[in-house]
Amino acid sequence: MSKIKEIIQASIDTKTAILHGQSLHNNIDLCVEKITHALKNGNKILFCGNGGSAADAQHLAAEFSGRFYKDRKALPAEALHVNTSYLTAVANDYSFDVVYSRLLEGIGQDGDILVGLSTSGNSKNIINAFITAREKGITTIGFTGNSGGNLKEYSDILINVPSNDTPRIQESHIMIGHIICQLVEENIF
């Protein structure tokens, strides 16, 4: 098998494991329910991640605030890292470990949803944000790899992709995020 086919097959194998993972399906359903409820109650969805997961967080926030399938009103969703002046100031003045938790202190409200994407589940800045979220009554949804890492302990809902391979995990995070966005959009509109 060529290397290209091996990589494609690895992606298919991960998605096949997700297809047959009933507990993961239950958690995806729960995410849809919680996000739908939050948005119907006037709350917002906030996203955070690092590196490629930051790009994925921004991508998923845009699916909610822009549009997915339906031409509809915008839903309140934002990625916490999009203000580079804030991000670099707080990382410089305090620590990169608090860039998300500090912003959440300022804009997070009881009833909001925080989605944190971390393939390892061990990103300190996301864990700190989840700790702050709990203090504020914000539901936390962790998107991780197989083990869930340390983020598992702080996630109200854990979406742990059954893989330890970062690219396969990130591909699956986008697929699952798209599923959630589609079903929330259908619920609301």
Image (cartoon, rainbow, N blue to C red):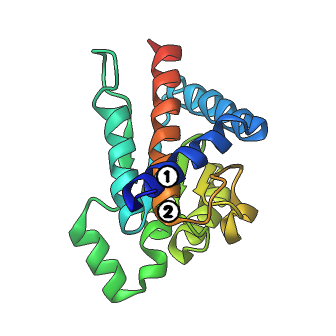
Name above or below for residue 184 compared with residue 104: above
Residue 125 in sight: yes
Residue 44 locus on image (x, y percent)? 46, 39
Contact, mark 1 vs mark 2 (Cβ under 8 Å): yes
CA–CA distance in space, label 1 to label 2: 6 Å
Q: Position of residue 61 (x, y in %)?
A: 37, 43
Residue neighbourhood size for the residue with mark 2, other residues' Cα within 10 Å, grouped as few (<14), some (14–19), many (≥20): some
Q: Which residue reaches farthest top?
A: 189
Name the image quarter holding residue 71. top left
Where does label 2 land, which residue? 105
* Outermost residue to the front: 1
**Residue 77: mark:** none
Q: For this view, does 166 lie left or right of residue 3? A: right
71 lies left or right of 167: left
Is residue 80 among the parts visible in the rendering? no
Give the quadrant of residue 19. Answer: top right
Q: Amino acid at mark 2?
A: Glu
Instruction: State the image coordinates of residue 43 (x, y, percent, origin top left).
Output: 50, 35
**Residue at the image point whose x is 62% and y is 52% from the top:** 161
Front residue of this view, candidates 163 and 48: 163
Q: Residue at the location (72% across, 36% down)?
A: 20
Q: Secondary structure at mark 2?
A: helix
Residue 93 locus on image (x, y percent):
34, 88
What residue is drawn where x is 60% and y is 74%? Answer: 122
What type is the residue that disc 1 sits on? Gly
- Check disc 1 and report the residue beneath it: 108
SS at mark 1? loop
